[in-house]
Image (cartoon, rainbow, N blue to C red):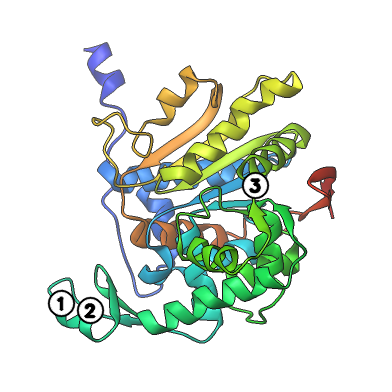
Amino acid sequence: MKAKKKILHKRIKQIKLGQNTTVAQLVEDMKHMSIQARNIGQCAHVLENIYKDKSRPTVFLGLAGPLIAAGLRRVIRDLVVSKAVDVIVSTGAIIYQDLYAALGHGHFTGTPDADDCRLNDLKIDRIYDTYVDEEKFWSTDQYCAKVADKLPPGNYSSRAYLNALADTIDDEESILYQCRKLGVPIFCPALNDSSIGIGLTEHRVRGGGLVIDAIADNMELVQIVVKSPKTAAFYVAGGVPKNYINDSIVMGYIYGMERGHDYALQITTAVTQDGGLSGSSLKEGRSWGKIRKQAKTAMAWVEPSVALPLLTGYILGKKLTKQRKRLKLDWQKGKLKCLKTA
């Protein structure tokens, strides 16, 4: 009976909502619920530990999936502005669609039941239940090419090119704009696998000499890891960004360093059973040394258009980053000369 009482000592709390319930309060209460609500609450708990850590972990935000199309542009932008993230590793599509919006083009409400052949005739592209203007995509591709045309020929990391791209726009709502303004590096290790890559292909076809150097991304990311006292990974979905954030840790051995992330959390709908990286558990990551044995981790299987606003609302609502100092990174020709708090 004593063993039974020990197991049955903590009751599930029935959530209470009122007219004045905030997002932060809702997520706080989710910690005491069950199933994915509890997992969201546990992710929030990991975030709280990250921002309370006096060692000031460097936070890597991995972004994959149709996040801008889903309506999360401002949410991601606010994570940057509020000092919640220090480094972004993203798919090219997300950054491209941020640029597309910064140039004044829109995402429009659609339906997954659309007549896609008719949409094709009208030059309308569909992202599940969101529409974009293909002709505006073409002009945005060309914009990427024209920016490359004006840069000196040579090898560029994705960070260096995206910083130059960001320097040409002036939109306070833009992720690119805010990252350039605030010194938050953005990496797109598979930049060619996006419409930005299409624009850079056009640049190359007409004789341009700008080359995106993928290994330069590796070099720059691992330098950030090596110079950070601790690291934290916040994976939104999975894909290439998750892998590169992990590989930046593994590559530390090149500099004689073996350590995993001190904190890690992920929101995704990818399954673990297919063995793919996107749904692989953070526990599995410990076997590779990507996640420290003692790391605080949490994982919620909740689609990011729902999960990310909840966790961002928790960060902002509880003012977790109010006293957090921003990182300053001093880059000189791909060398990270200095990483310190501003």
- Indicate the position of residue 31 as horizontal and vertical percent values: 39, 45
Q: Residue at x 68, y 20 (%)?
A: 253
Look at the numbered disc 2 and give the secondary structure of its residue. helix
Residue 329 falls left or right of residue 110: right
Looking at the image, residue 43 lies above or below residue 112: above
**What amino acid is found at the position of numbered circle 1 in the picture?**
Cys
Residue, disc 3: 213
Residue nearest the viewer, comparing 104 with 30:
104
Q: Callout 2: few (<14), some (14-19), or many (20+) C-alpha neighbours within 10 Å?
A: few
Answer whether labels 1 and 2 touch (C-beta < 8 Å). yes
- The disc label shown at residue 117, or none: 1
Q: Looking at the image, which is closer to me, 281 or 48?
A: 281
**On-image quarter of the C terminus:** bottom right
Residue, disc 2 = 120
Question: Is residue 269 shown to the viewer in this render?
Answer: yes
| Quadrant of the rendered image containing residue 319 | bottom right
**Residue 148 x, y percent position in the rendering:** 66, 68
